[in-house]
Amino acid sequence: MSSPNTAEELQRLTTVLAAQREAYGKAPYPSLQERREHLDRLEKVLRENIDAIVEALNTDFGGRSADETKIAEILTSLEGIKYYRKRIKKWMQPERRSLGLMGFPGEATVIHQPLGVVGIIVPWNYPLYLALGPLIAALAAGNRAMIKMSEFTPRTGELVKRLLASVFDEDHVAVFNGDVEVATAFSALPFDHLLFTGSTAVGRHIMRAAADNLTPVTLELGGKSPAIIGADYPMQDAVERIAFGKCFNAGQTCVSPDYLLCPEHRIDEFVEEFKRQISAMYPTIIDNPDVTSIINDRQHKRLQEYLVDAEAKGAKVIQINPANEDFSNTRKMPFTLVLNVTEEMRIANEEIFGPLLIVHGYQKLEDAVAHVNAGPRPLALYYFDWSNERARYVITHTHSGGVCINDTMSHVAIDDLPFGGVGDSGMGQYHGYEGFLTFTKPKSVFRKGRMNATAMLLPPFNRKIHDWVYKLMLKG
Ligand code: NAD
């Protein structure tokens, strides 16, 4: 059944798009001061509403760690604002390009022109950051934006709508909630650019819908991100850094390590160290406010089914449950290792997106690399090794959206690095200068000088001047 606001939101879509287009037409190139002021408004509303944001996310998840919300939703957004605010001045300058023989005398430049109205579709796992991250880049680039929040985070969706409406007119930034019908209609709107964050399966629908309008897309998708422990990397360090990416938001992160490739003879050492560290970090789970819940029953059921299916097909499932709690009436899940995984198991083929980690053994580094390359190209790849040479080998012999050497997940928080997938994990990128480029058109501008040098080359051809120019060109 549709939620009450679905019909209303569906109606608003086309009127808001028309209003944004009209407003964009009247102010197509916001000045540096205006863009900074737009970002300042965002910053202010975020700073003033930290508690409300924490509370909304906690309600939507049925238990979302307040610290995880502060770190991964609010701090990241504030850092993004700071990053763009500082750099747009430089990026707004026309870039001088070389003229070549044919352009002389004149001036060749590239200006980065805002695209107009940008659409942003948001998933449920980090609903604030994945709405604001693209919005910050879109506003810095001088655009207007329409945002569709996930139907699975209605409280956060309503809050984001209210907060953004308090600082932006609807013809500048507008937020939509409601069911998947709204998202489907949203993706079919003729935006000037559409940035989608979500699953690979839905990404295919988005690209099809956008194709009808020739709307360019950035697809920020998911997949199975591997972590590889090098042969002699200290296990305590490796586990600490892998646990960060695996446990944060209960593994409901697009760049969370999905499976581990561990030197075969070190698997027992990894399992023991993982159990030890997780038990120390999370001595209890169900009532522990540091542990985030699985977002809803559907996702919880999916993860349980992976375990049942894997166990039935011969996997070894190791749940880390230090206080021996009963998980039958909660959506919180213990952190779990899954060993002896084979290709017939669902968990081997589908993105986990939860607190489960597959552990595979490998003999030689080349085998680990071959394992990664046999699957679809992942969003992130993690490699643990102090040898730069081996790290270089892994980086250059695998494909992934990004790589973290000796850590998990933290590359996403480095604002100056582009963020985006490759192959099944997505196309295009935002964050950094690349984010500014995503939301602008690099427009070529050639300004001809007073003297019209081309006139000399006008017909009739085969005059001396033509011979001379051709000789000059062929000289190299
Ligand atoms: P999802 O693909 O189910 O939904 C994402 C958004 O798309 C939601 O807002 C939803 O309303 C909308 N949607 C659903 N069906 C649609 C359709 N047919 N047409 C148009 N829109 C539609 O993803 P999710 O479950 O919300 O999020 C989890 C997925 O997102 C995981 O695969 C994860 O890896 C990925 N993800 C990727 C990134 C990244 O930056 N690359 C970040 C977070 C999550």
Image (cartoon, rainbow, N blue to C red):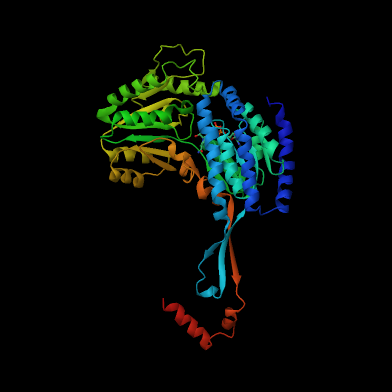
- Residue 52 picture location, percent across and down: 62, 27
- Residue 195 picture location, percent across and down: 58, 43
Which residue is at 46% across, 44% downward? 422
Count of marks placed on residues: 0
Q: Residue furthest bottom?
A: 464
Which residue is at 59% across, 38% downward? 132
Which residue is at 25% across, 34% downward? 232
Is residue 281 at all visible to an observer of this figure? yes
Is residue 179 at all visible to an observer of this figure? no
> Which quarter shows the N terminus?
top right
Q: Tell whether 386 sits left or right of 283.
A: left
Question: Does residue 110 lie above or below 234 as drawn?
Answer: below
Q: Tell whether 88 sits left or right of 190.
A: left
Question: Does residue 262 lie above or below 332 as drawn?
Answer: below
Which residue is at 37% across, 31% downward? 241
> Which quarter shows the C terminus?
bottom left
- Residue 356 picture location, percent across and down: 42, 25
Question: Quick one: 166 or 189, which is closer to the camera?
Answer: 166
Question: Does residue 200 lie above or below 309 as drawn?
Answer: below
Where ligand 1 lies, by quadrant?
Answer: top right
Q: Tell whether 235 sits left or right of 402.
A: left
Question: Quick one: 444 or 211, which is closer to the camera?
Answer: 444
- Residue 144 picture location, percent across and down: 66, 46
